[in-house]
Structures are given as structure tokens and as C-alpha cells.
Image (tube, grey):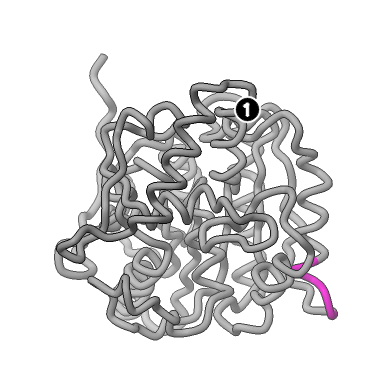
Amino acid sequence: MAQPSHPGILHQYAPRLVAFEFTSQNTSKPKPHSLLFIGGLSDGLFTVPYVSTLAKSLESTDWSVFWLLLSSSYSGWGTGSLDKDGEEIAQCVRFVRGYKTSQCGAGAKVVIMGHSTGSQDVLHYLHSPNPFLHDPKFEKGLQHLTRPQVDGAIMQAPVSDREAVLNTVRGNNEAKGAYDQLVDYATRQPFTSGKTETILQPHLVKMVGLADDVPISSRRFLSLVSPESPEKPAEDDLFSSDLMDQRLRETFGAVGDRGLLRSSLLVLYSGSDDFAPAWIDKEHLMRRWENATNEGGKNRWNANSGVIPGASHNVKDQGQDDLVARVTRYLDDVLKA
């Protein structure tokens, strides 16, 4: 079956990095406000089905949707990092705000929206020191950029990669053995003798539920599976259900203090998420995140947040109308903020 075509503009927002802006065939008038979509692991252009639906639903509004490609898109995530993603998102925020200001004048608003591991990018962008405090061992390609404020932020399907992997190896001795081998090797040998990052064995990676056609470095693997959690969570471990309250204060709770979000945070969890283990109480987990975000009277949690009944991880069928309605109401809130 032929795939649908999407009219739009391909923008180069930084060297070797592009973003696709959906446009309408019915109007050539530029729109002042922008929603920047960030995919998850292995995502690229048009891999998440609801984004096109969302862009179409916003055609009659002053919002346009941009689909970002980062250096971690498609198969690049295995050697990427949240810091590098965050710096590239910052470059796109600057570019889009400048572009829209030149087209429409002052007052252009920019909202970032992450799907799956893109949600980790969004929360990492909002809670981390600005600029990021890089580990000197892993600074290749990082620029120590100061991140600009965003007018809004959305996290959709913020599931834990660590818990997804643990769910895969649970009760499977062969998979658990592969997991233990990977953790041991990655911990002992993060670098080759030539000082480059080591790449893990694909057949072992596949056994724990990760893609075997993507080169995965020891560093990124340990960040995703975070073997010392919940006591010492790694950078990528932001959404696990067993994280302690102190960790949530350092992440969700820091959103209001860091000053990078001008409005509130919208969080949308899929009720039938394929990657969320059955043991997770989604409603309870969302309440913990809300409490951490609002602690101390910060009031940064948006009331449109919630669990979308019946929605899969990427909301490919059931739940799209609910998601679009919540996002649309949220964007209205951003305009009022």
C-alpha cells in the first residue's frame, strides 16, 4: 500500500540536522506558534502515527507541528545521550523561534513534545543544569550550549526502558544470563584500548529486548538499564515506578526551579502501553509525578494530564481523539499563560 504524502517544509536548523514542518494545502499564511515533536528510540520521520493526525487537527489554529530529526534518530540512539539530544533540541528551539519571529513578529511560542524516550529528552531538558554538566569522558560532539526557555512541554508514553528490559528477562534464564553478561562487560570495559566507546554484542542485546541492528555502546546501555537503580539511577532512568521520592524531587521537582518552562507540564500515559509491565499502577505513578512537580506550591502540572484509556504506546488506533483533545486544550492553556 502506498504511504500518504505530507505537504510541508524541510528546515535545516543546524549542520546535518533537519526538522519537517507540516503545512496545509489550504493556506500559505505562516503560523506564529510551533509544536516540536521528538520521537523515541529508533523513531524518524512519520514513524509515530498520531503526529500526522495531530498536525491535521491543528490546521485551523495558529500552531504548526515540526517533526525533529536528531543525530540519535533512527539507528543513532545506541551511541547517543540525553545531553546531546538536549543540545540539538535547544538549537532547534532557537531556530524555530527566530524563524517564526521573522515571519510573524514577536510573541512566537514554542512547545516541545516527546514520545517514549523523547519524553526523557523533554524532562532532561527541563530539569538538568543549564548548560549540561558533561562527563569529560563522553564529550564528543557536545558544545556546552545554554538551553533557551520553552513555552510548554509535553511527555507522551513516558515509560521506563529499565523496567521494559527487566520485564523481558523476567523468568527467562537465558535472557537473564545475557543481561548479566552485558552489564558485566559494559561496566568493566566502557572503552576500547584505542579510547573509543565499546559496542555490545548484538545477539546478547537482542535477547534482552533491544534492537540487534543498532550499534549500542556500553555507556548508553548502562544508562538505559541502570543496573544500580533505584538507589543510584542512571541518566536515562527517569520514569521507573520504584524510583525514590528524592529522585523525583531532583527531576520532576526541579522543573519549576530551573526556569526553562514558562507554563506547565503535560504528561500523557498510554493506558494499554505495550512497553509498560503489568505490575505498574499507572494512576499511582502519575500521582507521584504530579506531587513531585507541584511540591512547594510550584503548580507546574497541567490539569489535562492523565492516563489515556486503551491507548497503545504510540497511540496507533484507540485513544488518538483523546490525545489530540488533551494536547489542543493544553496549547490553549499555553497561549493564556
> Does the image show residue 27?
no
Q: Residue at x 42, y 37 (%)?
A: 48
Residue type, numbered disc 1: Arg
Main secondary structure type of the part rendered in magenta: helix
Query: Where is 113 relative to 141, above or below?
Result: above
Q: Residue 270's x, y, as percent? A: 65, 37
**Magenta residues (range):** 292-296
Residue 236 in percent (x, y) is at 52, 57
Residue at the spot 39% in from the left edge and 54% down from the top edge: 220
Q: Secondary structure at mark 1?
A: loop
Q: Is residue 262 left or right of residue 203?
A: right
Q: Is residue 83 above or below residue 197?
A: below
Residue drawn 61% across and 60% down? 233
Q: Position of residue 126 (x, y in %)?
A: 55, 73
In which quadrant will I find the C terminus? bottom right
Q: Residues within 10 Å of mark 1 (few under 14, many from 20)?
A: few
Name the residue that disc number 1 marks: 170
Q: Position of residue 64 (x, y in %)?
A: 41, 57
Q: Quadrant of residue 74?
A: top left
